[in-house]
């Protein structure tokens, strides 16, 4: 069975959320871990803001309000963990990491040189635009338009 066939016969997302196994455990590890971490950070911040903006004004600061926020955060963390193990999404992240491994990353010296070229090009073009602006301002001033 090919990888595409296994994805086509995979469980729906709702069933996958209640599973406990890991899909292709050692493939695309770094991208999947970073994606999961970013989902977790987003969920925790969202639960904290939801607590501050919606739960506290309605319930006040009580143990119940904190329990609701922790439960929301916990559910979100679990969904994020299961999402990166959902076969369709996991195969996408595995493919992303495979493509990133094909990229030819510049050395530090090449990066510094390219950055210097970009910075000087921006400065040069901004000086030209400033010169054109000053020229048009003087010309319009002599014509009495501005």
Image: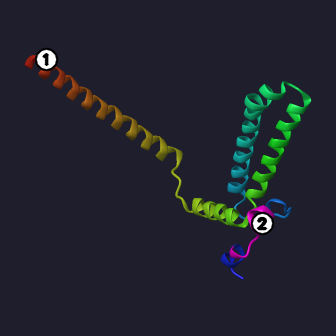
Write down the region rendered in magenta. 8-15
Quadrant including the N terminus:
bottom right
Q: Secondary structure at mark 1?
A: helix
> Considering only vertical position in the picture, is 135 above or below 67?
above
Q: Residue at x 51, y 51 (%)?
A: 106
Q: Residue at x 70, y 73 (%)?
A: 7
Query: Outermost residue toward the front?
Result: 58
* Residue 105: % across, % down: 53, 53
- Residue 43, located in which quarter of the rendered image? top right
Q: Residue at x 34, y 38 (%)?
A: 121
* Residue 16: % across, % down: 79, 63
Q: Residue at x 71, y 47 (%)?
A: 39
> Considering only vertical position in the picture, is 59 above or below 118?
above
User: Which of the two residues, 29 or 12, is positioned nearer the viewer here?
Assistant: 12
On residue 141, which mark appears? 1
How was this image coloured?
A: rainbow
User: Which of the two residues, 116 or 30, is positioned nearer the viewer here?
Assistant: 30
Number of numbered callouts drawn: 2
Return the disc, 2 or 1, that comes first in the chain's sequence.
2
- Residue 128, located in which quarter of the rendered image? top left
Badge 2 density bin: few <14, some 14–19, many ≥20, Cα 10 Å = some
For disc 2, the marked residue is 23
* Residue 28: % across, % down: 69, 61
Magenta run includes residue 114: no
């Amino acid at each position: 069975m090919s990888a595409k066939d296994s994805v086509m016969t995979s469980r729906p997302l709702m069933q996958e959320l209640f599973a406990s196994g890991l899909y292709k455990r050692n493939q695309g590890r770094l991208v999947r871990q970073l994606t999961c971490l970013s989902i977790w950070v987003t969920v925790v911040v969202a639960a904290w803001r939801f607590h501050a903006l919606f739960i506290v004004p309605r319930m006040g600061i009580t143990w119940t309000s904190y329990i609701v926020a922790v439960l929301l955060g916990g559910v979100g963390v679990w969904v994020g963990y299961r999402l990166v193990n959902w076969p369709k999404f996991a195969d996408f992240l595995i493919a992303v990491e495979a493509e990133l491994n094909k990229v030819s990353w510049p050395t530090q010296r090449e990066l510094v040189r390219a950055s210097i070229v970009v910075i000087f090009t921006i400065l040069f073009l901004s000086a030209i635009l400033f010169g054109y602006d000053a020229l048009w301002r003087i010309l319009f001033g002599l014509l009495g338009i501005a």
